[in-house]
Amino acid sequence: MSLLDTALIILAVVALLGVIFEEVTRINKAKVTLFFGTLSWILLFLASDNDSETNAVSAGLSESIAEIAGLWLFLVAAMTFVAYLNKKGMIENLIYMIMPKQVSERRLLFLTGLFCFIFSSLADNITATLVSCSLILSLDLDLRKRIQFATLVVFAVNSGGVSLITGDVTTLMIFLADKVEILTLLTLAVPASMTVFILAIFLSRGLDGTVTMRSHSHTVRPVDAVIGALFLLTILCTIVGNVLFSVPPVLTFLFGMSVMFLVSRFMSDDSELDPILEYIRIIEFETLLFFLGILLLVGMLKEIHALDSLVAIYNVMPPVYANYLMGLFSAVIDNVPLTAALLKSGISMTEGEWMGLTYAVGVGGSLLVIGSAAGIVAMSKIPGLTFAAYMRYLGHLWAAYTLGYAGVFMLGRFIN
């Protein structure tokens, strides 16, 4: 290994530590990964001795940029839809429309888990968690019960995202790498939803009170309802278009976003006061920049062949066990760089085994409150939800994760 390769690997490790200890350093992980990601590629170009090496580095960068562009554009379109619907109060209206006015705490826990699971498969995890935390904070619950609800929210949000490419970035990454078909991914909803139900049973202990929902209502204009329906139609067309005609999901979502712009232009009367294009500016660009930096770093590691060591664990044990461990690792290491590294390392697995990895890295981060974006958001929004408080339910979370992974394993054997 050359001195440059060693230096680049150290940069990648420092960037990963910056992500893990973001709460300690107070430096946003997007800034850290973007800095080290771009710096590492610049060093590769500067260290090239001849045109042949420069061309090879340039080709590697172009490949990484092309993959990042597809992921970025898809997420921009999906997040713009969700940002609009959230700002217009459509999502909050939906919550209070389906929730009973007065309900037992135990039943509300199950309803919350169901809502989080379904909503997080359509929207990004951060939005799903924010909306769910707002619901929890509106209830008159004591600290212990509030933490029980928040724990289920984190697990349900992460579980809901694994079965649809709109719900979790790692699921989208694995699909875009042609490892699992889109309809096959949908079958993950069965074991994932069952484990949310099982965890809700574990967490429902001591919930014997009754709560009254505080009704909130936002005016829904015809244009808002049409755009909400358009969002669901775009998801449906994405699945159908990909299965029947191999249309890339990014193309379908960009088309759906363009239709949303036109619908707003011709149906809305506030084009000057609330222009539809403004919603692109309020999406989570910090998240997008984080993905950009991470994928640049992983692309660099592939370029210098530093990912070969990741395959070692798959040489030592069967993929079914290795994937399970990767899920546990994702509670400590962010699942995006972990998944990107595994995809770039050239691991060969069956479609059922890739399904197991999809579930593991998507849900495994729920084991620790710092292991996923949903957990970090919940910890920042729910008073009293600390690392130690969440750890009290580690046994329940681990059991639910293990049962879910076992269900995916059985499902994978059936598919194979």
Image: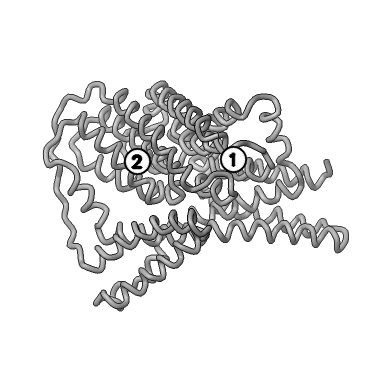
Establish if 322 lies above or below 256: above
Above or below: residue 132 compared with residue 89: above
Give neighbour class at mark 2: few <14, some 14-19, many 20+ (Cα, 10 Å).
many
Q: Label 1 sits on what residue type?
A: Leu
The residue nearer to you, when weighing 228 against 83, is 228
Disc 2 residue type (three-letter): Phe
| Mark linked to residue 117 | 2
Q: Is residue 128 above or below residue 250?
A: above
Q: Which residue is under mark 1?
A: 338
Q: Furthest residue to the right?
A: 50
Nearer to us in this view, 248 or 258: 248
Residue 49 visible, this orientation:
yes
Residue 375 in sight from this viewpoint: no
Image coordinates for residue 319, horizontal then vertical, percent: 61, 30
Earlier in the chain: of badge 2 and badge 1, it is 2
Q: Secondary structure at mark 2?
A: helix
Q: Nearer the viewer, mark 2 or mark 1?
A: 2
**Residue 357, position as x, y percentages in the image:** 55, 36
Left or right: residue 164 versus residue 178 is left
